[in-house]
Amino acid sequence: MIYEKHIRVEFNHCDPAGIVFYPRYFEMFNSVIENFFADVTGVSFYDMHQTPGTGAPIVDAHARFSIPTRLNEVLQFTLEIEAVGRSSLKVLIKAFHGGTERLSANMVTVWMQNWKSHSWPKEMREKMLHFMEAKS
């Protein structure tokens, strides 16, 4: 299954040339991941971070930027789970505009407790696996 989120490019995302300044894409990637967790696992980033030392930080990221995106364009982001490990989640995120891929990123996030990697909570892991296996 593929998770989707649309993000309109705002002035604060752009450089003086009027295109998205590439570090802003990482904020958008994080927004997609944050919304994925809330919508699919039922655990928001707010809930994750109520206990100090707990959360799901990105530990590995590789991005490819194919075509510039301009102010006010709407990007359709997709997130597909590639693997669920004991404490890790590997995802592929892509962004499209008008059906054309603009960028993609491979990212790994890890569940942590007490500032160390830890097994995913059972219910969260089961929901991620179910989502991954529900490919059409």
Image (cartoon, helix red, strand yellow):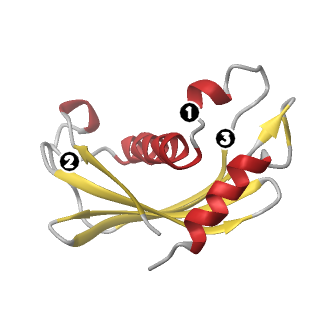
Provide residue 51's location: percent of width, then percent of height.
Answer: 76, 20
**Relative vertical location of residue 130 with respect to residue 56 in this rendering, above or below:** below
Mark 2 near mark 1, Cβ–Cβ under 8 Å? no
Spatial distance from mark 3 to mark 1, Cα to Cα?
13 Å
Q: Nearer the viewer, mark 2 or mark 1?
A: 1
Q: Earlier in the sequence, mark 3 or mark 1?
A: 1
Q: Which residue is mark 1?
A: 44
For badge 2, the amino acid type reads: Ile
Estimate the x, y position of residue 122 in percent, counting from the top left.
79, 49
Where does residue 92 sit, x and y in percent of width and height?
A: 51, 66
Q: Which mark is residue 57?
A: 3
Label 3, label 2: how far apart the Cα atoms are: 27 Å
* Residue at the spot 79% in from the left edge and 39% down from the top edge: 112
The disc, 3 or 2, on the residue closer to the chain's N-terminal end is 2
Q: Position of residue 43 (x, y in %)?
A: 60, 37
Side (left or right) of 25 relative to 71? right
Q: Residue at x 31, y 69 (%)?
A: 66
Q: Is residue 39 left or right of residue 124?
A: left
Say which amino acid is labelled 3.
Pro
Q: Could you tell me which residue is drawn at 70 percent across and 57 percent down?
A: 126
- Using the rendered view, name the quadrant where residue 23 is placed: top left
Q: Which residue is mark 2?
A: 19
Report the front residue among 115 and 54: 54
